[in-house]
Image (tube, helix red, strand yellow):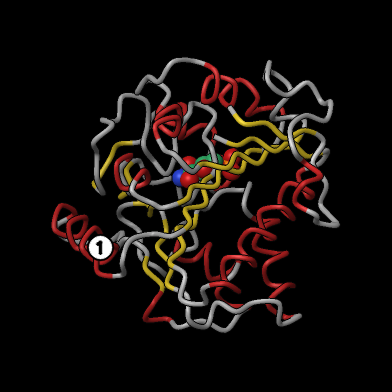
Amino acid sequence: MHLEVFASADEAAARVVEMLVNRLTTKPTTVLGLPTGATPLPVYKLLIQAIDRRQCTLGQATIFNLDEYFGVGPDDPRSYAHYMRAALFDHVNHRSDRINIPNGLAEDPRAESSRYEAAISAAGGIDLMLLGLGRNGHIGFNEPGSPAMSRTRLVALTDNTLSANARYFRPDAPAPRSAITMGIATILSARQIVLLVTGQSKAEALRQTLEDPVSMQMPSSALQLHNDVVVVADSGAASKLSVADGSRKGTAGSRERAQPEAMGVRSL
Ligand code: GLP
């Protein structure tokens, strides 16, 4: 794993966008895995700006979203399909037939999950999987206790996640209590994984993700098993890491990029 720590969430997001732009420039048909939540919003904002400046395009890319709430349709404001349109897709040129999000209204969630896995395989697998991190270590909606070999499936959300995400819902349209999510093994099948973690509230989860032994009680720790993971954090999220004390470490200068500049870079 490779850790890069930035002074602010915006700089961390800029670094992720730099990686996305590089990918999409090198391979316009890149297959991306994308997350939702508050963390990636600055990434999507900056990516839209980069696309407007013609630094890259999503016109030939294929996208697989990590997860979708179960029981809500794509036009429901609670759905991640709605979130993705508002945050990204409505603002950029893309091929709608190459945008994939699990169907939250599927009558047979098991069949829908198999279909989703088959679609990822048919696309050639995910080149770059961008992830956020839940406070309890969930990635996608793989809650504590998720099997390491899990694939896309219907899952029940924990009370911890429901309360962490309650801020996104109104009382008259409560949060769905289950979701269809890529599994841990689906995520680990991506060729590269970029984990973006910002904010002090994620500091303990990030510490356990990187520094504790792999345990499915902390699903994100499974990322230690992958051979190409870049962790991009801001100083708040990195504040409990013994490996990132804010001083410059590693090879930050070797990559010759103007900005964003990491406060600390480290191979774990
Ligand atoms: C949701 C999503 C995750 C996301 C997490 C963190 O539960 N399913 O993919 O990483 O929230 O969200 P936030 O970035 O808002 O803290």
**Horizontal placement of 17 versus 129: left or right?**
right
Asked if one can make out residue 258 in the rendered structure from this viewpoint, the answer is yes
Q: Is residue 175 above or below residue 61?
A: above
Location of residue 196 (image quadrant): top right
Ligand 1 within 8 Å, label 1 CB: no
Residue 119 screen position, x and y as percent = 25, 67
> Residue at coordinates 51% horizontally, 81% vertically from top-left?
94
> Residue at coordinates 50% horizontally, 15% vertically from top-left?
212
Mark 1 Cα-neighbour bin, 10 Å: few <14, some 14–19, many ≥20: few
**Residue underneath mark 1:** 121
Location of residue 63 (image quadrant): bottom left
Q: Is residue 15 above or below residue 59?
A: above
Q: Quadrant of the C terminus?
A: top right
Q: Is residue 160 above or below residue 154?
A: above
Along the line of sight, which residue is nearer the eye, 245 or 98? 245
Asked if one can make out residue 167 in the rendered structure from this viewpoint, the answer is no
